[in-house]
Amino acid sequence: MDTDTDLIEALGRLVKIAKGDTGQSRTVANFLLAWWNANSCGGFDLTDLWAVDTKITKDILAVTMLIAARNNYPDAYGFKADFERMVADWRPHLLKD
């Protein structure tokens, strides 16, 4: 079974991927931003997992376990600035006005 440390490391790897500009980066950002604020940032289509490498899918599933088990948002794990940056990069329209 994964420890909290393993799950948080998976989150860190996903955050790093979301900072890129590939299709997989977009998919990972969509997943993470759905956790951050699905109402504003949009949900996540589970079939998008078909578009990412198996390693990335495993990290997404690990983070899903973290979300379900700990009932926290990403800022509880020290990723607030990273998620704010993701919003700026992937959802810039949310920052207007």
Image: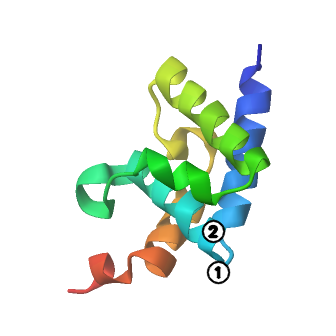
Label 2: which residue? Answer: 25
Element on which disc 1 rests: loop
Instruction: Residue at the far top: name it.
Output: 1
Q: Nearer the viewer, residue 25 or 81?
A: 25
Residue 35 marker: none
Disc 2, disc 1: CB below 8 Å?
yes
Answer with the quarter of the image where residue 62 lies: top right
Amino acid beneath label 2: Ser
Q: Quadrant of residue 66?
A: top right
Q: Position of residue 4 (x, y in %)?
A: 72, 23
- Residue at image coords 71%, 64%: 17
Nearer the observer, 83 or 22: 22
**Residue 97 vertical placement versus 31 (above, below):** below
Give the SS element for disc 2.
Answer: helix
Position of 68 compared to 42: left or right?
Answer: right
* Residue type, numbered disc 1: Asp
Residue at the disc numbered 1: 21
Identify the residue at image location x=50%, y=79%: 89
Q: Residue at x 66, y 57 (%)?
A: 52
**Residue 51: percent from left, percent from top:** 60, 59
Label 2 crowding class (10 Å Cα cut-off): few <14, some 14-19, many 20+?
A: many
Q: Give the image location of residue 73, x and y in percent.
A: 46, 40
Task: Name the quarter where the N terminus is drawn.
Answer: top right
Above or below, comparing residue 40 to residue 7 in the picture = below
Q: Determine the residue located farthest toward the bottom in the rendered image.
A: 97
What is the C-alpha distance between the residues marked 2 and 1?
Answer: 6 Å
Decide if residue 38 is on the left or right side of residue 28: left
Locate residue 19, reporting x and y percent.
66, 72
Disc 1 crowd, CA 10 A, few/some/many (<14, 14-19, 20+): few
Residue nearer the viewer, 27 or 19: 27
Q: Quadrant of the C terminus?
A: bottom left
> Which residue is at 66% across, 77% downward?
22
